[in-house]
Structure formats: structure tokens, C-alpha cells
Image (spheres, grey):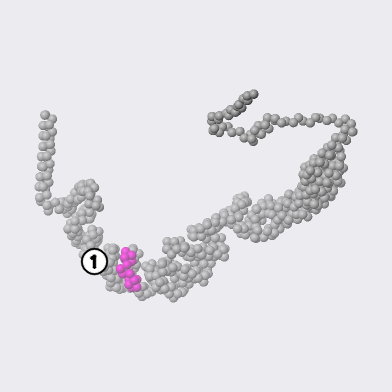
Amino acid sequence: METKPQKMPKVAKVKNKAPAEIQITAEQLLREAKERDLEILPPPPKQKISDPDELADYQHRKRRAFEDSLRKNRTVISNWIKYAQWEESQKAVPRARSIYERALDVDHRNITLWLKYTEMEMKNRQVNHARNLWDRAVTILPRANQFWYKYTYMEEMVGNIAGARQVFDRWMEWEPDEQAWLTYIKFELRYKEIDRARTIYEKFVYVHPEVRNWIKFARFEEQHGFISGARRVYERAVEFFGEESMDEKLFVAFAKFEEGQREHDRARVIYKYALDHIPKDRTQELYKAYTIHEKKYGDRTGIEDVIVSKRKFQYEEEVKANPNNYDAWFDYLRLVESEGNLEVIRETYERAIANVPPTKEKPFWRRYIYLWINYALFEELEAEDVERTRQVYRACLELLPHKHFTFTKIWLLYAHFEIRNKNLTLARKTLGMALGICPKDKLFRGYIDLEIQLREFDRCRILYQKFLEFGPENCVTWMREEMFLLLKQFAELETLLGDIDRARAIYELAVNQPRLDMPELLWKAYIDFEVGLNETEKARELYERLLERTLHVKVWMSYAQFEMSAAEEESVALARRVYERANQSLRGANEKEERVLLLEAWRDFETQHGDEESLKNVMQRMPRRVKKRQRVQADDGSEEGWEEFFDYIFPEDEATKPNLKLLEMAKAWKKQQQTEEESDADRNTSES
């Protein structure tokens, strides 16, 4: 028999080996099966019990099932509770009680177990059993507040008020949280036991010593009409917390209590006491409440006091944020000085001057040094303490870095202070030391003014000489207007003393200095000095000497005005001669702008003091203003274009150039010829 060859199964060829777009996982399959309820078990059939035997059989089976589950895992308390609740539903309370007791042997610290057990006893009106259970529960777990709450509630519900109070007392011995104390207080208030509630509050505020609890105690007293008791509670609270743990909320509540009793003076005292003792950064609500109180019941002074206190707090914050903010210190000190407390003012000044500028540059010290000045003036004028004023000045002078810079004002103020206190020798010694350390112009001037006021002219003369020796070539010394006034004072001093030659020698010494940038002011002071003495010739000589050094147009104009003011017969002719000389001088120096100024002044002079011929002579010399162009060259020599400018052409200058007019006529003729040739060329082009 022939055997047929065995056929191999065909293997399906996978055409596309790429993963499917939708991936199906085992978790997804299980979830879909659950959603479709593919394995829903039918509910057990309902059993209807009709006789005691069936009931006994049902109970036996259920108890055996519960006991089996308990044997499997005794620690699952929910199984015990279900078992006990089932027994309770079967009206077998003793059995349920036995199950709860067995469960407590397993886990006696389970709060839910105790609550279910006691709930069963109370539901079945077994009050004594429930009371025993609560007693056992609070003994074993005294920190479980639920037991205490339910225990007291049960006793109150059954009317055992004394028993409930006893339970509350046992509870309070464990010092529970605040809500427990408040619950006890509400319990006593429900039965109008005010004294007992007060006793509880007394213990409560010491067990939980928070500010809000003291406030609740005080409000309790106030609500029940014990005003003096409420005030006493607030006072005890302030004493209890002391100055280290003061809270603004307590004082705000205390003040509002007094405000409610129309004791506005008491409230004001409370606010002020709190503001003086509580740190400023914790008094915002206090300031706000104080301001509202004063606006309601205070006068203008009271409102200003509140505003001052608030501003003081703001300044404290500013100087704390930036101790070198001297403007804030000035405002703060002005505010403190308005209150008039010497100790507080001195303390604030000491705090202010302790903030020394961190750098040795004078601009940073300018504001700071006025703190010292104000401090010294306060001690002298307000406090009237001479010795402290002297100490302030000396401390300031020791603090200044004189090697880098100094402040003349401090030296002079200290010297004047000593003079006011009749210590002339010490004042001179101080100024002499100042000149030795830092010989400044202001120091010399201040010292000289001081000696002039004291009529010590010999000392003034010595100081003037030292001053001149100190800086004869100091441009600042001779250029500043104050120094000219000082020089004038020196000359006036010598004049008063009858020594004109000495005053004149001082001016000569000044104008003969070779290195002065602006000698004109000195020369003018010298000339005014001679004019003041009616020394016209000497003043004229000074003008001539000055013109040897400079030919400035203002000098010539001043010279001409001097000649006119000399009140001599030939004053007009002399002034006209000065103008003539000035014109020739400026013409030779080719100073066109200054020459125009001179001619305008000369024209005005002739208009007032001359005749028609002299005025015509000046007008013929007035220049003509023309616009010109010139090339502009860059720094590298390249041309950048043309620019326009105005120039002055004087008739006198044109007269000296006779060929200039002929050249201009030739230039104009050539330009005309070029124009005609261009017009002929255009005409021929158009015809062709």
C-alpha cells in the first residue's frame, strides 16, 4: 500500500511587518471585559424565613461565617464591627456587647471601635453601660477629644448636669486645646453659671496664654456687665505679657473698650503707652486706631500728636533703611525737637552723627556736617548747656579729616561761641590753630572780620599781611569778588586810621603781581579808591598805566566815562581825545568787533555832549556790515565747503586803499562782458 506524502501546512506570509497603528494591550482587554460585564454573577436568591428553626439555622450560618472571617484575620476591625452590628440587628445586644469586648482585646486604641460600641449602648438606652464605656475610653485615651465631647454631651442630654461638669473638670486637668475650654464655658453659660465660667476663664488664659484669649475673657466680663472686671482683666493682661511680649492687638482692644465706656482720656493714655513701648515696626494697626480715635473724640493737639507719632515711625523706617540719608535725619530731628524732650533729642542727635560718611570726599560731608552744627546750636540755645556745646564743637573738629579738607564754618562758629561766653583768648587760639592746620581764604576773612568788630586794628593789619603773604599769586584769592571786598575793607581800614599811603601801598602790591589772570578788577578797585579820595590825576595815571598792559575796549570806555565824571572844564574834550586814541589803537590792532562797540559808545557820547559836526565826524567812521563767504577746511586739511560770515568795512580803511575802487570797477566790467558773450552764443544757437 502506497503512502501518500505528508503535506506541510502552508505558512501565511506577512506582507507588512510594521507595527499596527492601534496597539491592544492586556490591560485594555481586561478593562473592556469589565466594562461589558462579561462575568456578572447572578445575585443570591432571596430567602424568606418563616419559622424559628429556619431563623436559628440562618443565624448559625451567619455566625459561623463571621467567626471564620475573624479566625482568618483578627486585626481587621471592620469585620468585628460588622459582626457586632449584625448581632445588634438580631436584637442580641449581649452577644454584640461580647463581640465588642473581644474586639477591644484585639485593639483597645481604635477610636472607631469605642465610638461604635458606645453608640450601640446609647441607641439601646443602656445609659450606665455607655457611661462605663466612656469612662473606660477617656481613661485609656485621654487625648481623644471625641470621647470627652460625646461623654459630656450624653450626660447633659440625660440631665446629669453635675456629672457633665465633673467630666469637664476631669477633661480640663489634661489641658486640652482652646475649643475644649470654650465648650466648657458655653456649657456653664447655658445654665447661667457666670461665676463658674469666670473661674474657667481664669484657668484658661494661663493654660493658653494668647492675646486673643485674654481679649475673649475681657469681652466676657463686658458682655455680662462687669465693666470693672473687664478693665481689671485688660490690666492683668498687660502686666502678664510685660514689655518684652507686648502685642498691639491687646492695646487696641483695651483702648476700644475704654472708648466704648466713654473714657477717652483712658483710651488716649493706653494708645500713648503702647506707642512708647512697642517696637515701631509692629504698630501699624495701633497708629490707625489711635488716629481714628483722635479724629472722633480728640482736639487739634491730640490729632497732631498722632500724626507726629506716625511721622516719627516713618522717619525711623527711612533712617533704618539708609543710615546715611541725612535729609531724613534732619526731618526726624526737627520733629523730635518740636516735642521738647531733651534726652530724646540728644539721643537722636547722637544716633545721627554716628553715621559718618564712608568716603573722604568733601561733597559727601556737606550735609553731614550740618548735623553737628544743629547739634551745637541746640545745646547752646535750647538746652543752654555751655560745656556740652563746647564738647560738641571739639568732637566735630577732631572728627574732620583736615589733611583732605576742612569746613571753615565750624571753626568760625566755635570761635564766635567762645566769644559769646567771654573766652576771647580761647577763640583766638582756636582760629590761630585753624590757620596753622588749613589756611583757607574764608578763615582769614572770618578772623579779620572778628578782629574788626573787636576794634583790634593792629591785629587786623597783621592778619591782612599774613593773608597777602599766604597767597599773593593765588588766582582764586585775587579773582574772587569776596577778596576784592576784603581788600577794599583793608584799604578803608587804613583810611579810617589815617594811613592813606599804607592803603595805596596795598593796592600797588596787588596790581604789581605778575601772575594774575584778571587784573582789571583790581585796577578798577584801585582807581575807585583814588577817585573816592578826589585824586583825579592819580586816577588818570592809573588808567594810563593800565592801558600799557591792556588795550581792551572796556578799559577805554571806562577811561572816557571817568574823564566825563571828573567835572572839569575840558572833560568833554578829554573824553573825546580818549575815544580818538582808542579808535586809533583798536584800528591798529585790527579788532573789528571791539572797534564797533567803541564807535557806538562814541556816537552816543557825541549825541549827548557833542555838536552836529562832531557827531557827523563819528557817523562817517561807522562801518558797513557785509556778508562774505570763506572756505572751510577739516582737521586733515581737506576742504569741506563754504560758510557765510559777517564782516565790517570801515570807511577809514577804504580811504587808505585808493586802488581798491578801480579794481572793483574792472571786475564788474569783466563780469558784464562775460554775460553779453553768453547771451550772443545763446541767440546764435537758437537761429541755427
- x and y percent of residue 232 in the render? 72, 56
Q: Residue at x 89, y 31 (%)?
A: 51
Look at the image and say whether residue 688 sits in the magenta stretch.
Answer: no
Residue 303 showing in the rendered view: yes
Tell me if 353 is positioned left or right of 637 in this view.
Answer: right
What segment carries the magenta color?
464-479
Q: Residue at x 58, y 27 (%)?
A: 10
Per the image, the residue denoted by label 1 is 542
Q: Residue at x 86, y 42 (%)?
A: 95
Q: Residue at x 19, y 50 (%)?
A: 648
Residue 265 showing in the rendered view: no
Tell me if 523 is positioned left or right of 337 in this view.
Answer: left
Main SS of the magenta segment? helix
* Amino acid identity at mark 1: Leu
Look at the image and say whether residue 471 sits in the magenta stretch.
Answer: yes
**Quarter of the image that includes the N terminus:** top right
Q: Quadrant of residue 687?
A: top left
Most distant residue in the right direction? 52
